[in-house]
């Protein structure tokens, strides 16, 4: 079983996608991680079942070993009874033989169960290796997914920026600047025209007042009148 082939299946992430359609790498990776988690769950279940069989096999070995030792002990006790004249030798031989046959059966079961236990232990080791490999790959692909999502964000932002830059060609930029300069020049000319119009509407009195600066002249006259009222002019003459 090659569980990693699931990462490259096309159309698994979206059921309605065509086979030749470009798949979303993020969705495809997420689907691959879900597949890995499903495989991990199945592998853990199989591991638990085989471990249970291995434990049972070890328990059976102990049980058969105990039976073999028990039949061996029974055969010895029966022969001792015959030796002590507590049991006829023919009967003792028959019973001891039956006990030894039972012991042999138990010994054969021990041998068979040991072979089975070794196979189960090998399967347990392989499944534990597979489980660890799946866990490592889940961790790897989860980290890969984080990196992929970050790269997608950066690539989208870069694409949008490049698209905007591409839409602003040099000719359109120069044309825009030229129009702006024309607009500024037109506004400056219009301001100068309004200034000329304002100057052309001045009367001769406005021009005279402007030239003589009547405000200052009026201020001098007002100051002289004020001094005269206060008698300052006479004092200064005196």
Image (cartoon, rainbow, N blue to C red):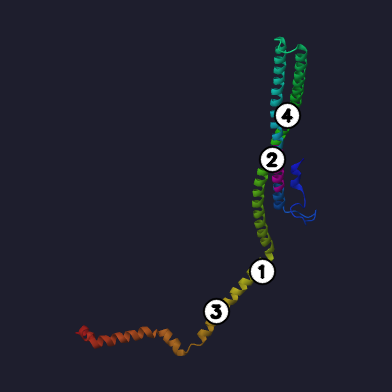
First along the sequence among labels 1 and 3: 1
Could you classify mark 3 by the number of other residues whose Cα lies within 10 Å: few (under 14), some (14-19), or many (20 or more)? few
With respect to residue 163, does 77 lie above or below?
Answer: above
Q: Secondary structure at mark 3?
A: helix
Say which mark, if any, is on residue 117: 4
Q: Which residue is mark 3?
A: 191
* Image quarter of the N terminus: top right
First along the sequence among labels 2 and 1: 2
Q: Nearer the viewer, residue 91 or 157?
A: 91
Q: Position of residue 217 (x, y in %)?
A: 35, 85
Seen at 72% across and 20% down, the residue is 71
With respect to residue 157, does 47 lie above or below?
Answer: above
Is residue 77 in view from this perspective? yes
Task: Please state the extent of the stretch shown in magenta in the rendering.
Answer: 34-47
Q: Which mark is in front, 4 or 3?
A: 4
Say which mark, if any, is on residue 127: none
Q: Which residue is mark 2?
A: 44
Q: Is residue 46 magenta?
A: yes
> What is the distance, in whole Å, between disc 1 and disc 3 at their CAs?
25 Å
Q: Position of residue 74 (x, y in %)?
A: 71, 18
First along the sequence among labels 4 and 3: 4
Q: Which mark is in front, 2 or 1?
A: 2
Q: Secondary structure at mark 1?
A: helix
Q: Which residue is mark 1?
A: 175
> What is the distance, in whole Å, between disc 2 and disc 4 at their CAs?
19 Å
Secondary structure mostly seen in the magenta stretch:
helix
């Amino acid at each position: 079983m090659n569980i990693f082939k699931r990462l490259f299946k096309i159309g698994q992430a979206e059921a309605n996608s065509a086979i030749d359609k470009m798949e979303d790498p993020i969705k495809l990776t997420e689907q691959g991680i879900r597949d890995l988690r499903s495989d991990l769950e199945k592998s853990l279940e199989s591991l638990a079942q085989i471990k249970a069989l291995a434990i049972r096999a070890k328990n059976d070995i102990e049980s058969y070993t105990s039976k073999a030792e028990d039949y061996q002990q029974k055969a010895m006790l029966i022969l001792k009874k015959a030796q002590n004249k507590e049991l006829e030798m023919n009967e003792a031989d028959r019973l001891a033989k039956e006990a030894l046959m039972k012991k042999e059966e138990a010994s054969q079961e021990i041998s068979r169960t040991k072979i089975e236990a070794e196979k189960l232990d090998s399967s347990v080791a392989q499944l534990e290796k597979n489980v660890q490999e799946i866990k490592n790959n889940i961790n790897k692909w989860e980290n890969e997914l984080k990196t992929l999502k970050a790269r997608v964000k950066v690539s989208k932002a870069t694409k949008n920026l490049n698209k905007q830059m591409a839409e602003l060609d040099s000719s359109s930029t120069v044309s825009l600047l030229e129009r702006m300069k024309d607009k500024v020049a037109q506004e400056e000319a219009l301001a100068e025209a309004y200034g000329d119009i304002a100057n052309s509407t001045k009367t001769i009195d406005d021009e005279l007042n402007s030239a003589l600066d009547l405000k200052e002249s009026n201020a001098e006259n007002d100051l002289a009148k004020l001094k005269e009222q206060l008698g300052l002019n006479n004092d200064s003459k005196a």
